[in-house]
Image (spheres, rainbow, N blue to C red):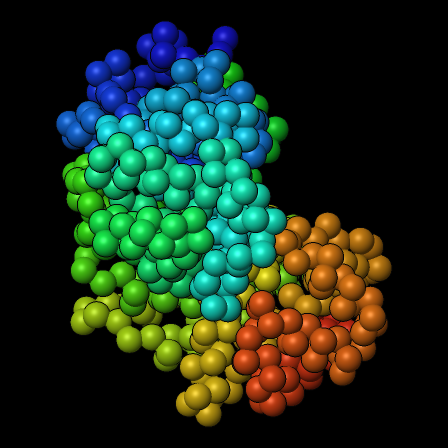
């Protein structure tokens, strides 16, 4: 039996299900990037808003490329199970906020039309850092990106997230319809401001007037999102099916912790997000930097070094006390670069992160976190490095994390086995690594010279010295001994 609206009453009473009549819910949000993170985070918050009475804020999800999510969810009325895993046990919840889903590449014009519908007042995004077709170091649109070039020449059949947003806003402008709010939920520095810059730059390439209209009328609130969401496996599906007594083709695994901080700036209204526990603030930046530099930076450090050391998951990596200490050191050194609002307890936040990383029920693969490092390093590691160097402070833990990324993108692990490197710059990085060879004194400067990632920081002598030395230790000692030596010094 398959999960579906007609079968909700047949599952065990202990499983939480939508606390509202789904037939009365209408779409108010289109979400670009219908992946596991959105379904474990924003969609859950909207599910709570719907239960509180905000019935005009259902979600239409759009997968920009793959039909897998649509094909899995459509036969089950877009219901899915959220499995919240903790050491003490797992809680299961069926989420009903997603009303429909589309695959953008199948009918791009239809998605644009849907986004142009006056009922849609928010377009939210989780397309990962690489999905914005920008240069991470500058935050500007990459005008030479293949998807940008395509979208400018095929305005009614876009491929990229910026292309769809601009096409829909252009349609609304032509029809005299007010713009929607663009709500970015990805880990970009100043994500709302960055996406506004990308979108208006893209629009200006079509029409300066369109770019100005979007800048003057649309809103792009900044946000901070936080929840760990591992990839769902076949074992996960089987476990969920056993609990539900029916099959769910696309459940989502997550942790108990969740946080969403949103700048309260919406052009066309919003649901009662506060009722769902969302923190509405006037300035998200301190929270965003806190998360990027404490959680994401240490997560990336554990991912690259843990993978090289042979650990499959973050929890596995954290069981090694030297790696746990490394994560703590990355957080300690980054914390001094932050200026938080009064009352923020950074020590408690850091302690909670270490506990979350060590959650044995959460199988978050190091390889999954290591994806797209060229897009992630500037926000997660390089900003803190820059601030620490400006204060003449040491950067050893961060330098080792950067060096581990370099060792990882060579495409071979410490035993010479191939690494499946997933990164938009993978080919360029592999060429540089091949030309430099496994020699730290050649490889580190070659990769630090990639302008799209490191910008001017890549030529900073103190960074070059620290990263080259760290990379040399990784080649000479291996990741485990290099980490142990660093945290024991």
Taking the spot 83% from the left edge, 60% from the top edge, the residue there is 415
Q: Quadrant of residue 43?
A: top left
Of the pair 277 and 62, the residue shown nearer to us: 62
The x, y position of residue 325, in whole percent, is 52, 70
The x, y position of residue 179, in whole percent, is 25, 41
Q: Quadrant of residue 387?
A: bottom left
The x, y position of residue 366, in whole percent, is 61, 53
Q: How many marks?
A: 0
Taking the spot 45% from the left edge, 28% from the top edge, the residue there is 109
Taking the spot 18% from the left edge, 60% from the top edge, the residue there is 282
The x, y position of residue 207, in whole percent, is 38, 50
Is residue 11 in sight in this rendering? yes
Of the pair 215 and 254, the residue shown nearer to us: 215
Q: Residue furthest bottom?
A: 392
Of the pair 382 and 211, the residue shown nearer to us: 211
Q: Quadrant of the C terminus?
A: bottom right
């Amino acid at each position: 039996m398959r999960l579906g609206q007609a079968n909700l009453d047949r599952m065990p009473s202990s499983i939480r299900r939508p606390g509202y009549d789904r037939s009365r819910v209408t779409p108010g949000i289109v979400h670009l990037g219908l992946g596991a993170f959105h379904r474990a985070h924003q969609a859950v918050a909207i599910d709570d808003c719907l239960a509180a009475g905000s019935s005009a804020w259902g979600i239409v999800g759009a997968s920009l490329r793959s039909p897998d999510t649509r094909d899995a969810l459509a036969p089950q009325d877009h219901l899915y199970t959220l499995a919240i895993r903790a050491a003490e046990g797992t809680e299961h919840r069926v989420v009903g906020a997603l009303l429909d889903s589309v695959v953008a590449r199948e009918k791009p014009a239809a998605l644009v039309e849907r986004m142009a519908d006056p009922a849609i007042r928010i377009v939210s995004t989780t397309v990962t850092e690489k999905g914005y077709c920008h240069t991470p170091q500058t935050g500007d649109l990459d005008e030479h990106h293949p998807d940008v070039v395509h979208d400018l020449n095929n305005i009614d059949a876009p491929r990229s997230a910026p292309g769809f947003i601009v096409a829909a806003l252009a349609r609304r402008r032509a029809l005299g319809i007010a713009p929607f709010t663009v709500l970015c939920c990805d880990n970009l520095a100043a994500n709302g401001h960055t996406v506004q810059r990308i979108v208006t730059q893209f629009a200006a390439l079509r029409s300066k007037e369109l770019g100005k209209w979007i800048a003057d009328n649309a809103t792009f609130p900044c946000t901070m999102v936080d929840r760990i969401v591992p990839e769902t496996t076949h074992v996960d599906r089987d476990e969920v099916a056993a609990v539900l007594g029916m099959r769910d083709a696309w459940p989502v695994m997550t942790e108990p912790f969740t946080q969403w901080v949103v700048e309260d700036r919406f052009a066309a209204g919003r649901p009662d997000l506060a009722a769902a526990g969302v923190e509405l603030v006037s300035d998200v930046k301190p929270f965003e930097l806190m998360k990027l530099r404490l959680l994401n930076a240490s997560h990336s450090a554990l991912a690259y070094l843990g993978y090289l050391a042979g650990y499959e998951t973050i929890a596995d990596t954290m069981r090694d006390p030297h790696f746990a200490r490394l994560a703590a050191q990355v957080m300690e050194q980054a914390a001094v670069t932050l200026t938080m609002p009064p009352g923020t307890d950074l020590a408690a936040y850091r302690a909670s992160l270490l506990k979350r990383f060590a959650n044995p029920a959460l199988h978050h693969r190091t390889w999954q976190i290591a994806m797209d490092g060229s897009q992630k390093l500037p926000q997660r590691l390089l900003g803190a490095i820059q601030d620490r160097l400006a204060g003449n402070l040491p950067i050893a833990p961060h330098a080792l994390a950067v060096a581990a990324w370099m060792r990882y993108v060579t495409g071979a692990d410490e035993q010479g086995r191939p690494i499946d490197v997933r990164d938009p710059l993978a080919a360029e990085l592999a060429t540089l690594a091949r030309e430099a060879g496994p020699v730290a004194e050649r490889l580190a400067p070659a990769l630090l010279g990639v302008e799209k990632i490191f910008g001017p920081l890549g030529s900073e002598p103190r960074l070059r010295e620290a990263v080259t030395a760290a990379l040399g230790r990784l080649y000479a000692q291996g990741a485990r001994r290099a980490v142990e030596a660093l945290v024991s010094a």
